[in-house]
Image (spheres, rainbow, N blue to C red):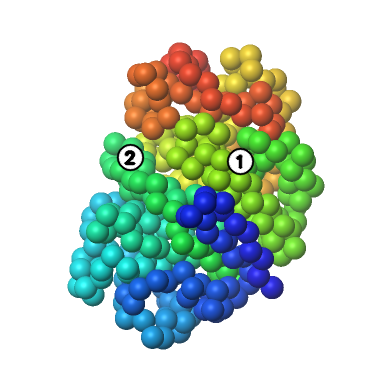
C-alpha cells in the first residue's frame, strides 16, 4: 500500500509517494513527466538492481539512462558534466525530465543538473536509501561538492514528485541503513521531543529493521521535513535548524575525504558535538546529550570522530559553512531535545574545546 504526503509550495507543490513497490506503479510517477524526453540518472550499484523496473514504465517516452560511479567522492562538477553531455546527446529540450534513481548523491547530482540544464527542467526523486528517503529527496536542495567543502555549488530546485519505494531498502547494506537512521534522529532531536521519546522506544526494532517501525518513522520524518520546507523553502529561518549536527559533520566529511565517513555517520557525530557545545555554552544540560548518545549507540551509529583530526583543519572547513553570517561562526545548537536554535558569533576557542 502506498501512502501519499504533500509538500505544500503553492504552484510548485508536489507529492511524496511512500510504499513497497512504488517504482513498479508507473501510473503514479508518469504523471510527473510533462515532455517526451526522459533521462534516468543512477549509479553503478543501484542501476543493476532497479533500472529495468523504471525503464519498464517509460514506454512511449524517448528515454536514455546513465550510471555514474557510486559514492560521495563523485558528487562533483565532473559527474554533473556527464549528465549534461547525456542530455545534449539525446537532444533534451526544456520539457525534458530527469529521474534520479539512487541515494542522496544521485539525487543531489541529478537535481543540480536539472536546475542548470536550459535554466531548469523537471526532475523526479526516486530515492533508494533510507537517508535519501527521509531527508535529501525532500525539499529541493541540490548541489555538488568542491575540495574546499561540501555542497558549495548548488541551487534550490524542487522535484515534481518523490517516489520512495521502501522495498529497495532490502538491498541496502547495514552501514548505509544505519546512516539513514541518523537523519531520523536529527528530525526529532531538533524539533520534536515527544517523537524523540518514541524513537527511544523503537530503537531496538529499528536496529533490527522491523518493517512496521521503519514504515512509521519514514512517514513521520517525511511529514516533518515537508512541513518545514513548506514554511521556509529557501532556508531563511526555520529550515536552517535541519542542519543540526551538520556544521561539525560536513567538516568531518571534508577533512576525512569524501566517502570515508558516510553522511549520516558524520551527522551522528556532529549532533553529539553540537550537544556538547550547547552544554559548554550553558544552553543545555548534560542529561539530554547523554540521551542522544545512548539512542545513537543503540542504533549502531558512531558518536566519536576518527582519531588524529586537527581542530584547526576542521575549523577551516567550518569557516566556509553556508550558514555563517558576517564573517563569524554560526551553529545550530539546542536547549535540550526538541529545542534547536540558531546561535551566532560562536567563539572558535569554544569549538576547539569540543573538538579537543
Please indicate whether residue 23 sits to the left or right of residue 219 in the image. left
Please indicate whether residue 227 sits to the left or right of residue 1 in the image. left
Q: Closest to the observer: 321 or 290?
A: 321
Q: Horizontal and vertical percent for residue 6?
A: 60, 57
Q: Closest to the observer: 244 or 240?
A: 240
Q: Do the residues labelled 1 and 2 touch (CB within 8 Å)?
A: no
Residue at the (39%, 47%) spot, across then down: 156
Q: Residue 2 carries which label?
A: none
Residue at the (44%, 54%) spot, across then down: 158
Residue 131 visible in rendering = no
Q: Horizontal and vertical percent for residue 16?
A: 57, 61
When the figure is inspected, residue 141 is found, relative to residue 167, above or below; the finding is: above
Residue at the (65%, 56%) spot, across then down: 218
Residue corresponding to mark 2: 152
Quarter-wise, where is residue 100 in the image? Answer: bottom left
Q: Closest to the observer: 62 or 241?
A: 62
Q: Is mark 2 on a helix, strand or loop?
A: strand
In the picture, the quarter occupied by the N terminus is bottom right
Residue 197 visible in rendering = yes
Mark 2: few/some/many CA within 10 Å (<14, 14-19, 20+):
some
Residue corresponding to mark 1: 186
Amino acid at each position: 500500500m502506498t501512502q501519499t504526503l504533500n509538500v505544500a509550495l503553492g504552484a510548485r507543490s508536489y507529492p511524496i509517494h511512500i510504499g513497497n513497490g512504488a517504482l513498479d506503479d508507473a501510473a503514479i510517477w508518469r504523471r510527473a513527466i510533462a515532455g517526451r524526453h526522459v533521462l534516468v540518472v543512477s549509479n553503478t550499484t543501484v542501476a543493476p538492481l532497479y533500472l529495468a523496473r523504471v525503464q519498464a514504465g517509460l514506454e512511449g517516452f524517448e528515454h536514455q539512462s546513465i550510471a555514474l560511479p557510486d559514492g560521495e567522492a563523485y558528487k562533483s562538477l565532473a559527474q554533473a558534466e556527464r549528465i549534461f553531455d547525456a542530455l545534449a546527446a539525446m537532444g533534451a529540450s526544456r520539457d525534458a525530465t530527469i529521474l534520479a534513481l539512487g541515494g542522496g548523491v544521485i539525487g543531489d547530482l541529478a537535481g543540480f543538473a536539472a536546475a542548470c540544464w536550459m535554466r531548469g527542467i523537471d526532475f523526479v526523486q526516486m530515492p533508494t536509501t533510507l537517508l535519501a528517503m527521509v531527508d535529501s529527496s525532500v525539499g529541493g536542495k541540490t548541489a555538488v561538492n568542491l575540495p574546499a567543502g561540501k555542497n558549495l555549488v548548488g541551487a534550490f530546485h524542487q522535484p515534481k514528485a518523490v517516489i520512495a519505494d521502501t522495498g529497495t531498502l532490502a538491498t541496502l547494506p547495514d552501514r548505509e541503513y544505519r546512516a539513514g537512521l541518523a537523519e531520523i534522529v536529527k528530525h526529532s532531536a531538533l524539533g520534536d521531543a515527544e517523537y524523540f521519546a518514541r524513537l527511544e522506544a523503537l530503537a531496538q526494532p529499528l536496529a533490527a529493521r522491523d518493517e512496521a517501525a521503519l514504515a512509521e518513522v519514514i512517514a513521520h520524518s517525511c511529514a516533518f521535513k515537508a512541513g518545514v520546507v513548506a514554511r521556509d523553502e529557501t532556508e531563511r529561518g526555520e529550515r536552517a535548524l535541519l542542519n543540526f549536527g551538520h556544521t561539525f559533520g560536513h567538516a568531518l566529511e571534508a577533512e576525512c575525504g569524501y566517502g570515508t565517513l558516510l553522511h549520516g555517520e558524520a551527522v551522528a557525530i556532529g549532533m553529539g558535538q553540537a550537544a556538547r557545545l550547547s552544554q559548554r555554552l550553558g544552553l543545555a544540560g548534560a542529561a539530554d546529550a547523554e540521551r542522544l548518545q545512548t539512542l545513537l549507540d543503540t542504533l549502531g551509529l558512531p558518536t566519536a570522530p576518527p582519531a588524529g583530526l586537527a581542530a584547526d583543519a576542521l575549523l577551516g572547513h567550518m569557516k566556509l559553512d553556508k550558514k555563517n553570517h558576517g564573517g563569524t561562526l554560526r551553529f545550530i545548537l539546542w536547549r535540550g531535545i526538541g529545542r534547536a536554535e540558531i546561535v551566532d558569533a560562536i567563539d572558535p576557542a569554544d569549538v576547539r574545546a569540543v573538538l579537543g
